[in-house]
Image (tube, rainbow, N blue to C red):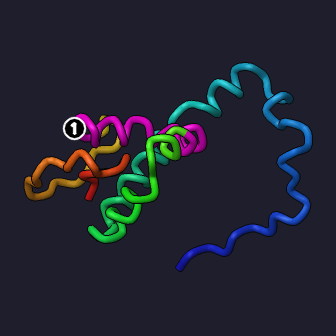
């Protein structure tokens, strides 16, 4: 069961930048990948069907992937591991039967499942 989205009424992203108020160390830590989040992303991707992964490959262009990596820095290592054929170090993928290499036309998440 998914949790309901929080009420975003009154959230104004055009207002003051909350990052400005953070101390430099907190700002640096906030932008670093988190191992728990990376493990959760790997688990969620592993639970997706081939059709769902293909849909992600269709809609996640390299440009979209760059924006998503700003939002979720954990994606950088995951995508790099997929492109390089290896598993992320902090969040190892479950063992699966060998698969054919992803075709070049696949998107940022090609070969994940």
The residue carrying pointer 1 sits among few (fewer than 14), some (14 to 19) or many (20 or more) residues within 10 Å by Cα, namely few
108 or 33, nearer to the observer: 108
Element at label 1: loop
**Residue lying farthest top?**
24
Q: Quadrant of residue 92?
A: top left
Magenta: predominant secondary structure element?
helix
The reply, left or right, for residue 15 in relation to residue 42 is right
Q: Is residue 71 above or below residue 5?
A: above
Residue at 79% in and 32% down: 19
Across and down, in percent, residue 36 comes to: 46, 46
Q: Is residue 91 above or below residue 30?
A: below
The reply, left or right, for residue 101 in relation to residue 32 is left
Across and down, in percent, residue 13 comes to: 83, 48
Q: Which residues are magenta?
A: 67-87
12 or 57, nearer to the observer: 57
Q: Disc 1 marks which residue? A: 86
């Amino acid at each position: 069961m998914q949790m309901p989205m929080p009420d975003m009424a009154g959230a104004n992203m055009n207002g003051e930048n909350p990052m400005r108020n953070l101390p430099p160390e907190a700002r640096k830590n906030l932008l670093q990948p988190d191992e728990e989040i990376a493990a959760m992303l790997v688990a969620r991707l592993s639970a997706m069907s081939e059709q769902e992964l293909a849909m992600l490959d269709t809609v996640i262009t390299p440009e979209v992937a760059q924006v998503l990596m700003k939002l979720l820095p954990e994606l950088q290592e995951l995508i790099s591991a997929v492109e390089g054929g290896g598993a992320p170090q902090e969040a190892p993928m479950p063992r699966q039967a060998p698969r054919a290499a992803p075709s070049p036309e696949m998107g940022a998440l090609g070969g994940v499942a």
